[in-house]
Amino acid sequence: MSIIINEVFAEKAKLLKRPLLKKKVHPRRFAEIKKNKAAFQGYQVIEKEDISFPVKINSRDKILLDFGDHFVGYLSFSLDHYPELKITDTPIRFKFTFGEFPYEIMTPPEEYKGGLGSGWLQNEERSYVFLPCDGALERRYAFRYLLIERTDSASFPVKISDIVCTAVSAVDTDDVPQISTGDERLDRIYNMSLKTLKECEQDVFEDGPKRDRRLWIGDLRLQALTDYCTFKNTELIKRCIYLFAAYRGEHKMVAPCIFPDSPPCVDEWTFCDYSLFFISCLYDYIKFTEDLSLAEELYETALTQALTVYESIDKTCGSTVLNPFIDWCPSLDKSVAFQGVFIYTMRQLKFISERLGRPTDKIEGFIDTVKNTLLSFCDEDKGLFVTAKGQISWHSQIWAVLSGILTKEENTVILKKITCTDTEFTMRTTYMRHFYIEALYNNSMKKEALDFIKSYWGQIIDAGFDCCPEVFNPDNEFESPYHAPEINSACHAWSCTPAYWIPELLK
Amino acid sequence: MSIIINEVFAEKAKLLKRPLLKKKVHPRRFAEIKKNKAAFQGYQVIEKEDISFPVKINSRDKILLDFGDHFVGYLSFSLDHYPELKITDTPIRFKFTFGEFPYEIMTPPEEYKGGLGSGWLQNEERSYVFLPCDGALERRYAFRYLLIERTDSASFPVKISDIVCTAVSAVDTDDVPQISTGDERLDRIYNMSLKTLKECEQDVFEDGPKRDRRLWIGDLRLQALTDYCTFKNTELIKRCIYLFAAYRGEHKMVAPCIFPDSPPCVDEWTFCDYSLFFISCLYDYIKFTEDLSLAEELYETALTQALTVYESIDKTCGSTVLNPFIDWCPSLDKSVAFQGVFIYTMRQLKFISERLGRPTDKIEGFIDTVKNTLLSFCDEDKGLFVTAKGQISWHSQIWAVLSGILTKEENTVILKKITCTDTEFTMRTTYMRHFYIEALYNNSMKKEALDFIKSYWGQIIDAGFDCCPEVFNPDNEFESPYHAPEINSACHAWSCTPAYWIPELLK
């Protein structure tokens, strides 16, 4: 795996790292999780009495703590004996299972068969030889529920004097003015989305604080968009853009993701649409900050993405060997959607170039060439874009619309038509749904966009989530790209854009 | 549970706490444990190649590290990826199982059914989200073998750059002159015993560094005896004597054990022979240091033990309600042995009193009274002591001999006779064997004492132990007072006195 490091940008990213905000949070109440077929994923949380410390725990006891909301942080606790009963003459042992949602708590880690490494499962076991003692887990967890099991066999009770989560984030939702749309459901969706962004906003914009805890550029762009209008943490956005410019893969391509901790490193493959979104990040940065200096500094990096991707395109069919991501839709023929992304980002690059007084003729040439190829996939009879493999996907329509090569009227027809087209190639990720909303918004379909948000994110609230999840398919509660719903992230950045869209759509 | 604290003594004990010596130790080689009926407890260690770091470990790999000797300390390690192969995009998880002996490594913790709390089992599991990283386990372990299992399911290898045990002890065997008895087996027994004492010598004299990690006065007395002649760590002996004087149970009785960590506390019951050994500790202290000040300061404490225990004795049958320990011998009628202990310690108290210029008449009265009772259990026909329940035990004979109420000739006859007496009430602990050796030594049976040491501790060496164990029954390799041999301590202070006896017996 080759990695090309620009030390200047790396240093700038490093200097922009700020201490996180910390808040001490106590568990709010005891809870119980019961099987209930009517509940999301078959589990219902029953709230029990409020917690007041100390809490007595005997050998083999299990207690489920509900922190009352989703938190990202570090657990610490104080343990003691009951000297009036019996002193502790044996080490004690606790198993901690953290869960963002009930299914995660209830699924035994031994049964995990998922495609992602089981190291993501949020549990650990610790022993403590002497009491009283203060304990702490080094690993950061993302959770609302915490199951504590006392797994040692000693006969004495242990006194839990306190349990605290030191919740961390770069930002605080209290710093963002409260929303009041007049529609309670929209307000709740906005707040859930804002909370999601906050939870993911750490040393970098993480995709999800439970998993994968890294900086993906696809997520970053959506997070930044939302952040400009809410937390306004522009320094962190800048830091993340520098990170992508600093650590690049083969051919100086912007990596799809960066592992920010330890010496930063990047993954060994490329998503060319994600590389192109580096341009979108600079575009948004100018739009929201009116500051040209970052784009000036990173212009060459942006241009490299355009040139490299353009060169990779087969001009007759519009496909690329550089592996676009687009969506998690199995067997999707991505070439049409990819061309849409290419033109979409080239228009943004043209805008940046103009603002910086750079030549735009080459970029315009790119747009014209790919536009012609893309248009060739527009099936006049069907009134929709059809790929070389004959697929009619939501992805092709949405990105063709976003590419801006058709008129508003044509776009509106396409966007309406796809909703009543029978196709297996539907939007799978909430990330992809963002671009659908953007397509509706760009084409004066604000009502449809708002209705869509209320319907989809509303169902997320009904399912019991505290944040916007990575995966949510109303038709399959157990959908998981990893074949293990318990490892799905229940707080995922790419689902947070309602906090951007709701105010924008109500303007 | 009532605890009476003398703050002056407690403060003195605290001030005598010294920093421990630390040594960094690396694992020496890889090893494998194989089933072998001929080996001790059915497991044989096969030594493999020497370890040189880094060590590569894949998911589901198990590696067994042999540190080459027994150590007490803290594990730390450095982990990294192989960026040329694949970076780590998932947390990794390791299970660590520490063992003093192979059976401990090979017995699954899930199957533990022992009488002691399972928290003593030496294993833990940890996950690490980002690499490279340095890891460390907070808990102190006692071990020679370390099994590392990578339990996560991620597909990349992990580089273990280093593994270190920071071994701790109050003393260093290098500071004790090497022994050379001319008998290699005796030399080895001496060294193993010295090593055992060193491993147990921490912030206090612990009974065993794996378990129970606390200060028992029965063990302390034997440890101190050995230490005076080897490490000469008199400050630590003094500290421990102060601890027993500082934290006492009901009726100001010296507790059988003190939990030295956290705020020190004591267990809720008493072993009256153990309380009396407080006198032995002071007696030995004077004998070896010629310093009377400690005994002067703690004389009242010593006297209280004598008075309280004497009062508890039923003068017609010599039994006490104060529960003597004597040995781990089920159904043992302890009254005769207890009377032996009482007279033995009263003679020591008389010696102390004389040295301090205190009156001795009361103590002499105690001795005379109990001597008469004890003598009444001497069965002239059998030539042995027989308890009220008709038991002929080793314990009764040994303690009757040690009480010094008979002549050397009578003692010699008894000590020879018991070896050819068929009785189920034999010595069970190595602790009890110490007093047998003392009885032989006091009665000019040095050769028998040396032969006994060579035979019993020699078999311990043959079984593969690195230190002297808590439990060793050559006729039952799986003997465990806790019904779980894996939880037995393989390095236990009360077995360390050959390092005291061998030089003494060869004088």
Image (tube, coloured by chain):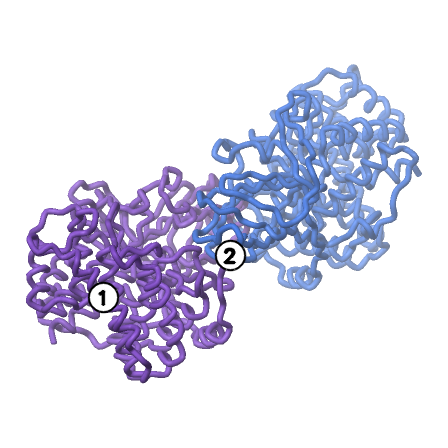
Chain colours: A blue, B purple
Residue at point 82%, 41% (across, down): A500
The reply to whether callout 1 and callout 2 are in contact (CB within 8 Å) is no
**Could you tell whether B339 is left or right of A175 in the image?**
left
Q: Chain of mark 2?
A: A
A415 vs B99, left or right, is right
**Residue that badge 2 annotates:** A131
Q: Position of residue B109 (x, y in %)?
A: 38, 42
Viewer-nearest residue: A121 or B317: B317
Chain of the residue displaying label 1: B
| Residue drawn at x 22%, y 52% as measured from the top left | B428
What residue did someone put label 1 on?
A: B497
Q: Amino acid at mark 1?
A: Thr
Q: Is residue B235 above or below residue B192?
A: below
For residue A435, say whether it is visible: yes
User: Can you tell which quarter of the image residue A64 is in?
Assistant: top right
| Residue at (66, 43) in percent of width and height | A208
On the image, the x and y values in percent for residue B392 come to 15, 50
Local packing at callout 1 (Cα closer than 10 Å; few below 14, some 14-19, many 20+) is many
Asked whether residue A248 appears in the rendered view, the answer is: no
